[in-house]
Amino acid sequence: MLLTGCATSALPSSCIGLRGVQAVPVEQADGKVTIRYIYADEAVRLPHLQCRADQGERAAMVELARALETGDSLARDDVRAAALYEKAAQDRPAFTSIYAPPVRLGGSGQVVMIPNADGGPGDAEAKYRLGRMLVEGRGIGQDVARGQNLMAAAQRQGFQP
């Protein structure tokens, strides 16, 4: 099968030249495999988090936003933290559907469902932390109702602060 017109994603500029990172697969009790990162030193951790966040990894977005919110290892920046939480909290479709037209006149087309690797509900911790920032009006305009809804959604997903 030949696909044409598909865009390939270029490596974000934040990822170019990163060294001193080791990725170790870890199998969870439920059989799910996650990646644990080991850094040569602390100076590598933040640029690596930025790289992973720029590639759309929710866990990295949350970890970087937490560091920005608390001022851990870098200058505190509530505006940037809120933006990262917002992105990580977004629900994403579990599948992308692609329509393939019929091959010959009078034939029928076909819809192919492709699973999205990072699809599904948004990150629960990101929802909770963004909700708290909205309630307090830190880094983002105050919106108590939306903040409370996000915190409730996080708790429904199993997040306990």
Image (tube, rainbow, N blue to C red):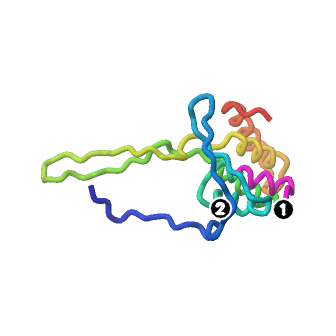
Q: Image height check: is 28 above or below 146?
A: above
Q: Which numbered dot is residue 74?
A: 1
Q: Residue at x 85, y 60 (%)?
A: 76
Residue holding disc 2: 51
Q: Hey, what amino acid is under mark 2?
A: Cys
Magenta stretch: give its range. 62-74
Q: Position of residue 125 (x, y in %)?
A: 72, 41
Along the horizontal axis of the image, is 111 left or right of 125? Answer: left
Dividing the picture into quarters, in which one does residue 51 lie?
bottom right
Count all numbered tags in the image, as a single digit. Answer: 2
Along the horizontal axis of the image, is 102 left or right of 5? Answer: left
Screen quadrant of the N terminus: bottom left
Out of 20 and 111, give the one closest to the viewer. 20
Q: Position of residue 151 (x, y in %)?
A: 74, 38
Dividing the picture into quarters, in which one does residue 69 lie?
bottom right
Q: Which numbered dot is residue 149?
A: none
**Mark 1–mark 2 CB contact (< 8 Å):** no
Which SS does the magenta portion mostly show?
Answer: helix
Along the horizontal axis of the image, is 135 left or right of 52? Answer: right
Q: Hey, what amino acid is under mark 1?
A: Leu
Screen quadrant of the C terminus: top right
Q: Residue at x 67, y 58 (%)?
A: 21
- Say if the magenta span includes residue 53: no
Work out whether mark 1 precedes mark 2 in sequence or the reverse, and give the earlier one: 2
Tell me how far mark 1 sits from mark 2, CA to CA. 16 Å
Q: Residue at x 59, y 29 (%)?
A: 30
- Say if the magenta span includes residue 70: yes
Q: Image height check: is 42 above or below 128?
A: below
Q: Position of residue 154 (x, y in %)?
A: 70, 36
Q: Position of residue 160 (x, y in %)?
A: 77, 32
Out of 63 and 43, give the one closest to the viewer. 43
